[in-house]
Amino acid sequence: MMVMWAEATDLKYHIASDDFKNAVVKYPEKKQKLLELADNLAETDNPVLMVVKVKSNK
C-alpha cells in the first residue's frame, strides 16, 4: 500500500496537462471521477490524500 498527499493546485495542474488528457487508461470511469474531483477543488483547499493498493500478480 502506498500513501501520499498532493497539493490541490498540483493536482489541478496535472489534470489539465496534455500528458493526463492524452493518457490511455485501463479504466476510463476512474479517470472521469478524477476529473470530477479536480473540478470540485479550489486552489486554496487542503491537500488531497491518495491511497493506492497494489495488486499482486501471483
Image (cartoon, rainbow, N blue to C red):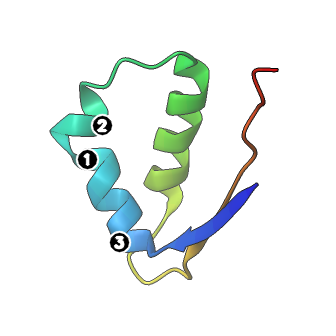
Q: In the image, which disc is placed on residue 16?
A: 1
Tell me the quadrant of the picture where the N terminus can be found: bottom right
* Three-letter amino acid code of the residue under disc 2: Phe
Q: Secondary structure at mark 1?
A: helix
* Three-letter amino acid code of the residue under disc 1: Ala
Query: Would residue 12 appear left or right of 30 to someone viewing this image?
Result: left
Query: Would residue 18 appear left or right of 52 to someone viewing this image?
Result: left
* Above or below 40: residue 46: below
- Tell which circle, 3 or 2, labels the residue nearer the N-terminal end: 3
Q: In the image, which disc is placed on residue 9?
A: 3
* Residue at the extreme front of the image, as rendered: 58
26 vs 1, nearest the viewer? 1
Distance from the alpha carbon under mark 3 to that under mark 2? 15 Å
Circles 3 and 2, Cβ within 8 Å, touching? The answer is no
Q: Is residue 49 visible?
A: no
Q: Secondary structure at mark 2?
A: helix
Give the residue number, with chain letter if any, for mark 2: 20
Distance from the alpha carbon under mark 1 to that under mark 3? 11 Å
